[in-house]
Image (cartoon, rainbow, N blue to C red):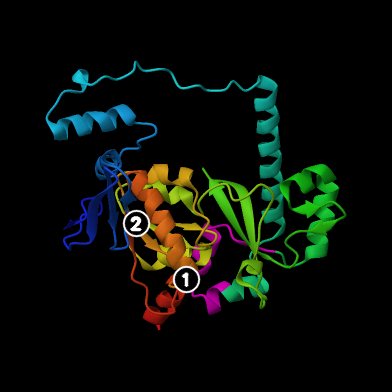
Amino acid sequence: MRFPCPIHGGRELSAVAEVKDNTLVFVCFSGCGAEGSDALGLIAAIRGLDVRTQFREVLEEAASVAGVSIDSLPLAPRTRAFTPEIAPEVVEARREAAEGVRRVVGALLDLCPLTGEGLRYLTEERGLTRRTCEDARIGFVGDPDRVLRVLSATFPAEALDVAGIVYDGGYLAHARHPLLFPIVRGGVAVYVQGRALGPVAKKPDRWRSMRGGVPGLYNADALERADVPVMLCEGPIDTLSAAQWVPDVAPVGVFGAGGFKDEWAAPMRGREVWVAFDPDAAGDKGSATTMRTLVAAGAWPKRVAMPSGMDVNEWYLAEMA
């Protein structure tokens, strides 16, 4: 049976449902990424519920559709979810480690103001304004030797190695990836991703991560503006281009089309999300996976139709020319 997808609110007959082995299977082929393997999953997706954490609410919706009372169903009594206790000393050790990383990141950015080739690249080649770059607190490692000396004299070697800024042996991680894009939370830089300016052998080689993995979305503080759609971009330059170009959106970004994590979807529940990943194979695959995650979290994702061969920044530059 084909029908308009109730999850993304489409009008075309893009969704298909059929029964296989006494189980309802549904999928939407419009690009919204909705799919599921039972009736409860379909109801949960439509209502913006999570079957795993809101199972009773999903059952209440299903009972309402069936015209019965949930009280008449043979449900097991609720049990409190198990939450493992974490020893206070472990909590304190984690807090101190996180604070140490923040201090290292802050010092790195203080030592690396955006000047020279980094500023020229972003403003002249990528069309970003100096104000946009300053607001985003982008840095540039103009003198790697000096940065290494000062950081090594300021922090213990272990702290620098744990942060992934200076590795054991005295190697500055971002010496070859000097353009620094910080992830900021509540006004505090907690992480920095380095980008190479010159040519690289493979696309993933363009970026240099810290230890521990990316902790959140780029420009995540923009999500505090809850009255506008979210624009999810692939990379910080696309994100900042959207911030300059597209009015009335909350632009956020991931480092790579496959980099979206399930826990990042929660703040987008109930919101329209424009997924603007690059129009290539990786972008198509990442968009489909990310949109399924967003649908499961109760968001309303839509894939942005990008011009052939253009990312957001290239599209912006073409429109501004």
Residue at horizontal 62 percent and vertical 23 percent from the top: 86
Q: Is residue 124 above or below residue 22?
A: below
Residue at horizontal 32 percent and vertical 62 percent from the top: 31
Residue at horizontal 79 percent and vertical 59 percent from the top: 172
What segment carries the magenta color?
A: 122-140
Tag shown at residue 33: 2
User: Residue 29: horizontal and vertical position, in percent?
Assistant: 29, 62
Between discs 1 and 2, the one toward the N terminus: 2
The reply to whether residue 65 is visible in this rendering is yes
User: Residue 55: horizontal and vertical position, in percent?
Assistant: 33, 30
Residue furthest out toward the left = 67
What is the total number of numbered labels drawn onto the structure image?
2
Residue 87 in the magenta stretch? The answer is: no
The reply to whether residue 277 is visible in this rendering is no
Task: Using residue 4 as the reference point, say whether residue 253 is left or right of it.
Answer: right
Query: Residue 21 appears in which quarter of the rendering?
Result: top left
Q: Are marks 1 and 2 in contact (CB under 8 Å)?
A: no
Q: Is residue 100 above or below residue 261?
A: above
Residue furthest out toward the right = 169
